[in-house]
Image (spheres, rainbow, N blue to C red):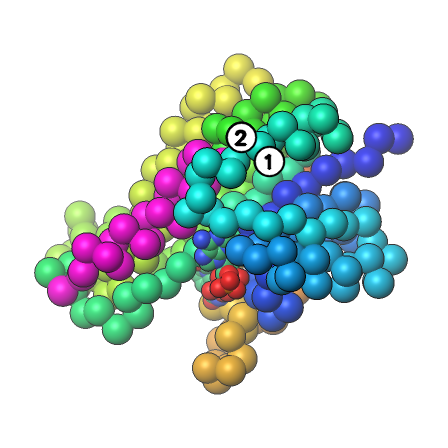
């Protein structure tokens, strides 16, 4: 059987959800492109998976460097001819302490949109032919419960904390719908996953409600391997449709 190919963005931190997702997909037999902002990060995490007996390789991929996407697509086309799973996991959280939309700086808004919206959008578009060439490719966008702060304003006025991050994740859900529509005549399904509260930054402390990265990654890998006929354009949390 032909080995399935996956690419995970922002997978350069051992404690991060990207790396946990890369491992979960590798455990299912995927050959995983473990990507990160630096070659050293990407190769170190890929080597960790290979040392566990998995099939993986590291690649530098900076979501803010959209010019690099076409050469990446060409490399994947030459080497594999298709991509079975794309996990848009990379993210920045530039404005954690910003209390309202009126306090957001233009730099933070741009940073959040560059990595959380423009990057996944342009990367998915650059890889479209490879996704369509796979028998049942899945694209998963890592959303966040933060999007509800924006989506919920229609029902109840309130402040949106971390407004650049929250609005970028809200927009990512809308992008998920648009990409799902654009792939509608193909086998490609595009969905978003809200991973919940995940213990990916233990150096900041662990809350009682935090789930381990491996637990959250199970649901990301689940969305990356949905069967034919599953929803496209949805938002999932713990395997349940929430949007
Ligand atoms: N952890 C949670 O509780 C939680 C909750 C809701 C949603 N999420 C979402 O789940 C995903 C993973 O969460 P996490 O906590 O593991 O995230 P994270 O560690 O904060 O960030 C994920 C990775 O994105 C990378 N990254 C940042 N800018 C990049 C760029 N320009 N190009 C490529 N990679 C870049 C970071 O790389 P560096 O290591 O180089 O900084 C980091 O390894 C994110 O999309 C996040 O928004 C997480």
Residue 30 is left or right of residue 84, and the answer is right
Where residue 98 sits in the image (x, y, percent)?
A: 22, 69
* Residues rendered magenta in the picture: 103-123
> Relative to 198, does residue 224 appear above or below in the rendering?
above
Query: Which residue in the rendered view is the most extreme toward the top?
Result: 185
Q: Quadrant of residue 216?
A: bottom right
Q: Nearer the viewer, residue 214 or 105?
A: 105
Q: Classify the position of the N terminus by image quarter.
A: top right
Direction from residue 63 to residue 29 in the image, left or right? right
Magenta segment main secondary structure: helix
Locate residue 170, reporting x and y percent: 32, 47
Task: Note whether residue 49 is visible.
Answer: yes
As for residue 109 lying within the magenta part, the answer is yes
Q: CA distance from mark 1 to mark 2?
A: 5 Å
Q: Is residue 236 left or right of residue 117?
A: right
Residue sitting at x 59%, y 50%? 60
Label 2: how many Cα within 10 Å (few below 14, some 14–19, many 20+):
some
Q: Nearer the viewer, residue 37 or 157?
A: 37
> Residue at the location (68% across, 41% down)?
6
Mark 1 secondary-structure assignment: helix
User: In the image, which disc is placed on residue 72?
Assistant: 1
Q: Is residue 221 magenta?
A: no
Q: Are marks 1 and 2 in contact (CB under 8 Å)?
A: yes
User: Is 223 left, or right, of 201 in this rendering?
Assistant: right
Q: Indicate the position of residue 152 as horizontal and vertical percent values.
A: 24, 53
Residue receiving disc 2? 70
Q: Secondary structure at mark 2?
A: helix
Residue at point 37%, 43% (across, down) = 117
Q: Residue 61 placed where, x, y %?
A: 55, 48
């Amino acid at each position: 059987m032909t080995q399935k190919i996956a690419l995970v963005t922002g997978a350069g931190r051992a404690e991060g959800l990207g790396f946990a997702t890369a491992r979960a997909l590798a455990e299912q037999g995927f050959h995983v492109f473990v990507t990160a902002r630096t070659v050293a990060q990407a190769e170190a995490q890929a080597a960790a998976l290979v040392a566990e007996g998995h099939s993986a390789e590291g690649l530098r991929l900076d979501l803010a460097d959209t010019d690099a996407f076409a050469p990446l697509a060409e490399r994947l086309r030459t080497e594999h001819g298709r991509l079975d799973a794309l996990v848009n996991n990379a993210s920045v959280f530039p404005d954690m302490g910003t209390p309202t939309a009126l306090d957001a700086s233009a730099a933070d808004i741009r940073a959040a949109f560059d990595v959380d919206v423009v990057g996944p959008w342009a990367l998915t578009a650059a890889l479209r032919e490879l996704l369509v060439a796979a028998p049942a490719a899945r694209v998963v966008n890592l959303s966040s419960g933060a999007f509800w702060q924006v989506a919920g304003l229609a029902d109840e006025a309130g402040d949106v904390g971390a407004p650049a991050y929250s609005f970028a994740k809200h927009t990512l859900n809308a992008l998920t719908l648009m990409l799902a529509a654009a792939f509608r005549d193909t086998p490609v399904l595009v969905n978003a996953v809200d991973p919940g509260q995940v213990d990916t930054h233990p150096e900041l402390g662990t809350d009682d409600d935090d789930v381990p990265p491996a637990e959250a990654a199970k649901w990301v890998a689940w969305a990356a391997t949905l069967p034919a006929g599953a929803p496209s354009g949805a938002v999932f949390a713990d395997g349940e449709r929430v949007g």
